[in-house]
Image (spheres, rainbow, N blue to C red):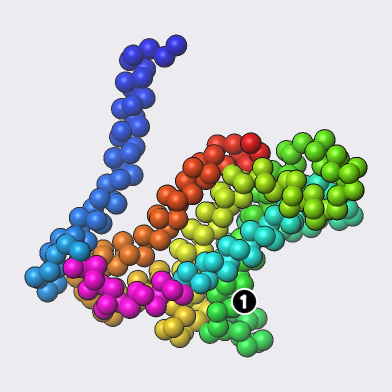
Amino acid sequence: MISRAERAANYTVLIVFAAFALFPIVSILSAALGPDDAQGGSAGLANFARAWEIGRFGSYLRTSLAISAFVVVLAVVLSVMSGYAFGTMRFRGQGVLFNLLLLGIMMPSEAVAVPLFFDLRTIGLTDTFWAVALPQVAMSVSFGTFWMRAYFRSSSRAIVEAARIDGASHWRTLWQVLVPPARPAIVTLTVLVFMWTWNEFLIPLIMVTKESLRTAPLGLTFFQGQYTSGFTLLAAGAVIVATPVVVFYLFLQRHFIRGMLEGSVRE
């Protein structure tokens, strides 16, 4: 039984950390809604309209959305299939292949970005949609395989064996038996991959020079350096860029939190 003093101490600590986490968000929002510190005049929601028009965020958001959707769909599907293979099957070289995949988690993107640029330039893929999307798919699949393997290894072996006795193929066992109860784990992976892809800055910066292929974070950087010198419009642009991630998380937060708390263990 928790005493009243312990409960009060717990709430105090939580309130302090919540205030610490929310202070930057509140500061950016208040700056975005305040008067324009560079030109004066406009305030409130008008700052978002001006930032949207001046910074051409509509184009950048469409590019980020297209890249993020492609990366999320492909990375999650590949992660589910590879996680199923590593989690339920036994084959020669399994340990070596899995450790090789884990290098994708341990290797920072900064270490491979420059060599990757020259490789993609050799085959003529730089300054294309694929130069931004495919490297992020590869990096996300490494973590996704590790994540889904943990789920499938914890799944009931009796269910898998029963499906095989009934004549179900590996494909049917995966998608009709194991995937439905894996929804929290898959949703958690989807949210993480979306956030990582949306916020990726280095890969788009190195791989593309066309303005039409700039992602939202990259466009925000150019907006800061070329279009405005005031902090108000920059804060409004930052809010615009961050809003899709926040909305996506809020829409899936129930499944995301459940997947995190269960440690990718099925319901």
222 sits to left or right of 85: left
Q: Where in the figure is residue 218, as x and y percent of width and height?
A: 41, 73
Q: Nearer the viewer, residue 106 or 133?
A: 133
The amino acid marked with disc number 1 is: Pro
Q: Main secondary structure of the magenta part?
A: helix
Residue located 34% across and 14% down the image: 4
Image quadrant of residue 32? bottom left
Q: Is residue 133 above or below residue 72?
A: below
> Which residue carries the number 1 mark?
115
Image quadrant of residue 16? top left
Q: Tell me if residue 122 can be seen.
A: yes
Residue stretch rendered in magenta on the structure = 46-63
Q: Where in the figure is residue 185, as x and y percent of width and height?
A: 61, 46
Under circle 1, the secondary element is helix
Q: Is residue 175 above or below residue 238?
A: above
Residue located 46% across and 70% down the image: 64
207 sits to left or right of 43: right
Q: Where in the figure is residue 128, as x and y percent of width and height?
A: 55, 83
Q: Tell me if residue 113 can be seen.
A: no
Q: Residue furthest front?
A: 166
Q: Nearer the viewer, residue 119 or 1?
A: 1
Residue located 49% across and 42% down the image: 254
Quadrant position of the N terminus in the picture: top left
Q: Nearer the viewer, residue 92 or 192?
A: 192
Image quadrant of residue 220? bottom left
Residue located 55% across and 75% down the image: 132
178 sits to left or right of 61: right
**Does the stretch in magenta take in 111?**
no
